[in-house]
Amino acid sequence: MRVDDFYDRHPISEPQVLAAVARRRGGDLSRLGPDDLFEFDQDHYGGLKAVDELARRAGITAASRVLDVCAGLAGPARFLASRRGCRVLALELHAGRAAGGVRLNRLVGLDGRVRVVRGDATALPFRSASFDACVSQEALLHIDDKLAVLAGCRRVLVPGGRLAFTDWIAHASLGERERARLVEWMAATTLQSLDSYRALLGRAGFVRVEAEDLSDEWRPLVKARLATFRALRGDLAARLPETRARDYEQLYAFFVGLLEDGKLGGGRLSGSA
Ligand SMILES: C[S@@+](CC[C@H](N)C(=O)[O-])C[C@H]1O[C@@H](n2cnc3c(N)ncnc32)[C@H](O)[C@@H]1O
């Protein structure tokens, strides 16, 4: 499956975020601030706490120029800008998600500090040494050439700048047929182990590399997310044919099963340029 097709039918989208916020506020979408969106606009595991942890490892301060690679609807970028006071450039491939990110930034008055650029993480369209920190969450799993992304981040960081990201991690027991299904169903490709990611970071030129296994932390989170998708089925079915809404749930249940069996997990990696 192509990444764009996967995100065309993903349950987290701009209309879903706005519908959830409207429900929460009795239909009133006026005078929204970034905090009104945070419960709904983060597409990774562990919510705002996970973004905070990454920001700490990436050394992000108010003075940082931050690049969020594969930024989705720019939810984490808005959180970083609003809490840390930094400027964030949110790079996103999917046209609908990039446009949604622009509109959500404007809606909550953060368009001055969070800029969205539509582009491919394997060919970062930025000058060398133009960022102090790079972050990314649950996205490199979609990209074949992970070394190209990491080397690109190394190039656009200033010397000593920090990269911190989280991603799916393949454990040794993940079989070839399961890998093939993840490619076909979730556009999840060339999944790495923590050790192979360490090696890739080294090849990309990063030093002071750190790797943490988040698999135990993620297991209950992905189960909770599956329950949320099930609860959202009504919303999803309104936008997609019912069979596609059900398909999404089934493939997500397959993914959750791999985590429960210890075949897949999560990792947080960081390094200095
Ligand atoms: C699971 S979402 C995570 C979004 C965001 N990081 C967050 O935590 O809310 C993964 C995102 O990566 C984007 N993506 C996948 N491949 C990409 C690429 N080659 N370049 C840029 N973005 C990409 C997808 O379109 C999707 O929006």
Image: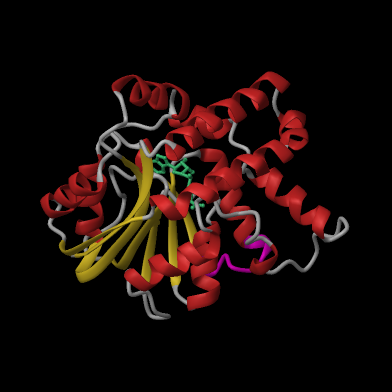
The percent coordinates of residue 88 (x first, y second) are 44, 65
The percent coordinates of residue 244 (x first, y second) are 64, 22
Asked if residue 151 is positioned above or below residue 231 in the image, the reply reads below
In the shown orientation, is residue 148 left or right of residue 136? left
Residue 120 seen in the figure: no
Q: Is residue 66 magenta?
A: no
Residue at 38% of width from left, 36% of height from top?
A: 142
Q: How is the image coloured?
A: secondary structure
Ligand 1's quadrant is top left
The percent coordinates of residue 106 (x first, y second) are 64, 61
Between 131 and 197, the residue placed more toward the observer is 197
Q: Quadrant of residue 68?
A: bottom left
Residue at 16% of width from left, 60% of height from top?
A: 206
Between 143 and 174, the residue placed more toward the observer is 174
Q: Quadrant of the C terminus?
A: bottom left
Q: Quadrant of the N terminus?
A: top left
Residue 268 seen in the figure: yes
Report the residue that reaches farthest toward the bottom. 62
Residue at 14% of width from left, 49% of height from top?
A: 199
The percent coordinates of residue 174 (x first, y second) are 32, 30
Q: Which residues are magenta?
A: 106-114
In the shown orientation, is residue 16 left or right of residue 211? right
Report the residue that reaches farthest toward the right. 26
Count of numbered circles in the view:
0
Asked if residue 34 is positioned above or below residue 90 in the image, the reply reads below
Report the residue that reaches farthest toward the front. 261
Main SS category, magenta section: loop
In the shown orientation, is residue 256 left or right of residue 237? left
Asked if residue 206 is positioned above or below residue 159 in the image, the reply reads above
Residue at 51% of width from left, 27% of height from top?
A: 5
Asked if residue 156 is positioned above or below residue 57 in the image, the reply reads above
